[in-house]
Amino acid sequence: MKISKVVIPVAGWGTRSLPASKNIPKEMLPVFNKPVIQYVVEEALHAGLKDVVFVTSKEKRVIEDHFDYNLQLEDTLARAGKLNLLEQVQAVSEMINIISVRQKQQLGLGHAVLCAKPVCGNEPFGVILGDDMIIGQDAGIVQLIEAARKYNLPAVGVMEVPPEKVSRYGIVSGREIAPGILRIENMVEKPRPEDAPSNLAIVGRYVLTPDIFWHIENSERGHGGEIQLTDALQKLAADGGMLAVKIKGLRFDAGDWAEYLTANIYFALQDESLRDDLLEQLRPLVR
């Protein structure tokens, strides 16, 4: 199974991040010294996926611009002798090949993935949610690609969540066929805790085969006319099988304020030049 493209849906309004996201896309909110979307793209890049399909909207052009050249800024940095910063911004500009498609109506995650059909065609592809960071060596989409290639099956990334949070996620259960890899037997969208088949939640990482598009196109629309990706995933799993891969590493949902703020602190603590000063300033605030 050859996978060369990753689809990153970024067209949503980001209402969970308001008012900060009123005029700034939630994917561009900074986590320490980089925007959220850059962490997501770096994960894809680490997996060898340089063709990035942004499913975007007219309000989100700044995301594409972040990965483009800014010649005026680069000239200013060069003339000021700030060569380290110049190297950093140029590296971002050369990081990926951007392919942009418009989601003209916000009709759910399934619809966002469907918008990428003309670009992905008949090839398998990855999907990463644009506001969901997973940090760790060979974690996230890397794990899914390895499993999908080995078993020649589509895959979703899962993590264990507390019982009180299962109603926020699609939940899967299945038969373990290798350490950390399950063949899915059941998938339920946002179940009540007492109805959940497990506590394994789908966490915004997918490797999908092109037949997912047919299932999305033939899915019934739900509340607000939205097309849910989980409905199509259930049919895809029933037709030919699907894997659930237990994701390693740390996960930060940038749409959750506690997790977003924790991510900022986590990355700042990795910077030795800031760590001691940051800890000193945090201690009086923690009681």
Image (cartoon, helix red, strand yellow):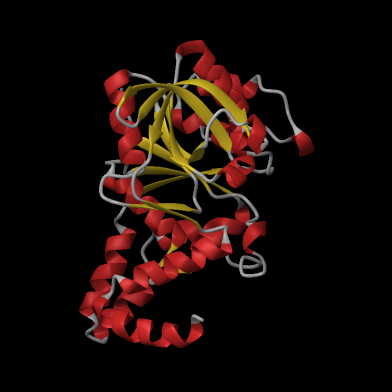
Residue 34 is situated, as x and y percent measured from the top left of the image, at: 39, 67
Which residue occupies the extreme top position in the image?
A: 239
Residue 128 is situated, as x and y percent measured from the top left of the image, at: 45, 43
Q: 198 or 227, which lies in front?
A: 198
Q: Which residue: 62% across, 26% down? A: 231
Quarter of the rendering containing residue 282: bottom left
Which residue occupies the extreme right position in the image?
A: 224
* Residue 46 in view of the camera: yes
Above or below, comparing residue 244 to residue 202 in the picture: above
Q: Is residue 169 left or right of residue 209?
A: right
Residue 130 is situated, as x and y percent measured from the top left of the image, at: 49, 50
Q: Is residue 39 left or right of residue 112?
A: left
Quarter of the rendering containing residue 82: bottom left
Above or below, comparing residue 108 to residue 45 in the picture: above
Above or below, comparing residue 14 to residue 48 in the picture: below
Q: 231 or 67, which lies in front?
A: 231
Q: Which residue: 33% across, 73% down? A: 269
Q: Which residue: 36% across, 64% down? A: 69
Quarter of the rendering containing residue 156: top left
* Residue 2 in view of the camera: no
Q: In which quadrant will I find the N terminus?
A: top left
